[in-house]
Image (spheres, helix red, strand yellow):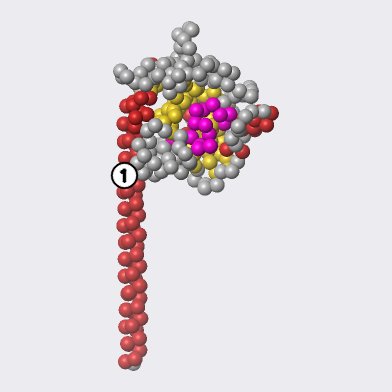
């Protein structure tokens, strides 16, 4: 009888030890999860605050209206959209207009103080504005696709990163297909609201299917022609050094891939496409919005 009691006590101590260990592990996991949530929230807030400050270098024109046309005879160029303050830089020389030039002759929805932004980061190549969404961000172009993946416009380490152009693109939005990346942030920042264009009972693309990219040398106005989910290695990410019949075939393939009905486009060899790309919950897919530059 005495031996049985000792075995029973040993068993109880064994069970008690593992229960205690399990509780300690659970507390540790909960504590670490809480720490990660707090640090993530702080990163989100820091990123939001930085980009909110950067928007002070822009101002809306006519309440952000996108349909305001220039006065008759006014030519588009770096001076289109007045400076925000004395000394703002609109001095970049604009090259002679040619058939490949699809910069719009309409007034942009916002004006941008390029001089001040270039002083903060010389890698800035544009400012993206999507009227249907709360998307208004500077666009940068780095030497590779990793640098700005988790660095903000001011080069601060932050998971939100930046809105940036594919490194292999020229960065001036005159390539046949320019790819622009942004994170799908849980708080809706960056490209976190991009999927709202097609989600819900009242998808945003029905309200406004245009987006803008302002640059120091002129502005581009894009009409969305394809919105869909695609694979990470799909033809969406094809880059072209020139245009031919294969490019036109690609344009039509992209339009046909759209998950929603958009205006049918007449693509030409001079068409300029921008592909906005963000991640989804599936690591093998991406959500993309493609627009064609419309001059008038």
Residue 84: % across, % down: 33, 20
Instruction: Please tell me which residue lies in front, 63 or 219.
Output: 219
225 part of magenta stretch: no
Q: Residue at x 56, y 43 (%)?
A: 232
Camera-nearest residue between 91 and 134: 91
Query: Can I make out residue 63 in this image?
Result: no
| Residue 125 placement (x, y as % from top left) | 44, 29
Image quadrant assignment for residue 87 = top left
Residue 70 position, x and y percent, is 46, 12
Q: Quadrant of residue 240?
A: top right
Residue range in magenta is: 163-177
Up-down: is 31 above or below 234? below
The image shows a total of numbered marks equal to 1
Residue 171 appears in the rendering = yes
Indicate whether residue 173 is drawn in magenta: yes
Quadrant in the rendering for residue 157: top left
Instruction: Residue under label 1, please give it.
Output: 42
Q: Residue 110 vs residue 96: left or right?
A: left
Q: Secondary structure at mark 1?
A: helix
Q: Residue at x 61, y 38 (%)?
A: 235
The image quadrant where one finds the N terminus is bottom left
Query: Residue most toward the right?
Result: 245
Q: Position of residue 218 (x, y in %)?
A: 46, 20
Residue 294 drawn above or below residue 31: above
């Amino acid at each position: 009888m005495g031996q049985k009691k000792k075995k029973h006590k040993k068993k109880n101590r064994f069970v008690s030890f593992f229960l205690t260990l399990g509780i300690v592990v659970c507390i540790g996991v909960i504590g670490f999860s809480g720490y990660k949530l707090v640090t993530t929230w702080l990163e989100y807030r820091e990123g939001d605050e930085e980009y909110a400050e950067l928007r002070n270098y822009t101002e809306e024109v006519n309440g952000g209206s996108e349909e305001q046309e220039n006065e008759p005879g006014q030519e588009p160029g770096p001076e289109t959209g007045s400076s925000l303050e004395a000394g703002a830089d609109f001095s970049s020389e604009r090259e002679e207009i040619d058939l490949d030039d699809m910069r719009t002759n309409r007034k942009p929805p916002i004006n941008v103080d390029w001089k001040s932004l270039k002083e903060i980061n010389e890698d800035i190549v544009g400012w993206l504005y999507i009227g249907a969404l709360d998307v208004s961000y500077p666009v940068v172009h780095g030497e590779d696709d990793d640098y700005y993946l988790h660095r903000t416009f001011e080069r601060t380490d932050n998971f939100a990163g930046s809105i940036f152009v594919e490194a292999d693109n020229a960065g001036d939005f005159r390539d046949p297909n320019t790819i622009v990346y942004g994170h799908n942030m849980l708080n809706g920042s960056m490209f976190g609201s991009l999927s709202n264009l097609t989600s819900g009972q009242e998808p945003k693309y029905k309200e406004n299917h245009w987006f803008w990219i302002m640059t120091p040398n002129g502005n581009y106005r894009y009409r969305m022609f394809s919105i869909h989910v695609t694979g990470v290695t799909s033809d969406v990410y094809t880059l072209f050094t020139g245009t031919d019949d294969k490019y036109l075939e690609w344009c039509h393939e992209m339009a046909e891939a759209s998950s929603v009905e958009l205006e049918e486009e007449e693509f030409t060899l001079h068409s300029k496409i921008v592909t906005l790309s963000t991640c989804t919950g599936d690591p093998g897919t991406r959500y993309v919005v493609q627009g064609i530059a419309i001059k008038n």
